[in-house]
Amino acid sequence: MLKLSKLTDYAVVALMRLGQQDDVMTSPSLSQVTGIPEPTVAKVLKILASHDLVVSLRGARGGYRLARPLNDISVARVITAVDGPISLTACVDGGGCDARVLCGVCGQWDAVNDAIRGALSAITLADMQSHGRQQPGAGECHDRDVGAADARGHDTNGGHETSVAGSAAAV
């Protein structure tokens, strides 16, 4: 099963919430409205800022805001910012593989990986937001498992992840 990391899921949630705001939001206020632990929100925002997806504003009225509109942020860009390049296997796009000589499918995963990368690049956070508004019960994510985080923002909830197939199918 293909899965997104919890941090990527949280990054999408944080970005979509920031996209609903006209003003900046602090890490604690974003934590409060999303239910994501504040250390995790802070970690996600730092990652997103380093990839130019959010802008950090300092000072008494400081906080975070989107660096670009939601329709300019693809799901693939968020995944890449948080987790690195989208690669189904180690040998995708010429990567190294210990079983290259024996496996017989070296290079064959590239087409599959390109299709998935293309699909995720074609879906923006604005698409997800507008699709969610059209669905009955939108915004009611009963199976979201918002785990605890320790003081460093590390997940302490056993590494549960969100399914790519489930997320993509919903869009």
Image (cartoon, grey):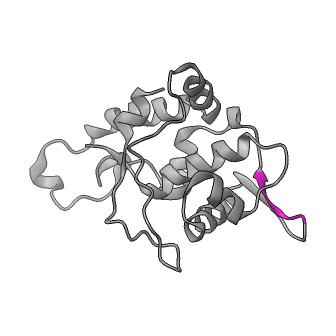
Question: Is residue 76 left or right of 59 when viewed as pictured?
Answer: left
Where, by quadrant of the figure, is residue 21 drawn? top right
| 14 inside magenta stretch | no
Say which residue appears at 60% left-offset and 63% top-offset: 41
* Quarter of the figure with the N terminus: top left
Say which residue appears at 49% left-offset and 58% top-offset: 7
Say which residue appears at 49% left-offset and 36% top-offset: 140
Across and down, in percent, residue 82 comes to 53, 57
Q: Main secondary structure of the magenta part?
A: strand
Across and down, in percent, residue 44 comes to 59, 62
Question: Is residue 55 left or right of 2 when viewed as pictured?
Answer: right
Query: How many numbered marks are there?
Result: 0
Is residue 44 depicted above or below 115 in this figure?
below
Question: Is residue 112 left or right of 52 when viewed as pictured?
Answer: left
Residue range (magenta): 61-65
| 64 inside magenta stretch | yes
Name the outermost residue toward the right: 60
Is residue 44 depicted above or below 132 in this figure?
below
Name the outermost residue toward the left: 102
Where, by quadrant of the figure, is residue 128 drawn? top right
Say which residue appears at 73% left-offset and 39% top-offset: 20
Q: Is residue 114 visible?
A: no
Across and down, in percent, residue 139 comes to 54, 35
Q: Toward the viewer: 23 or 54? A: 23
Q: Toward the viewer: 7 or 85? A: 7
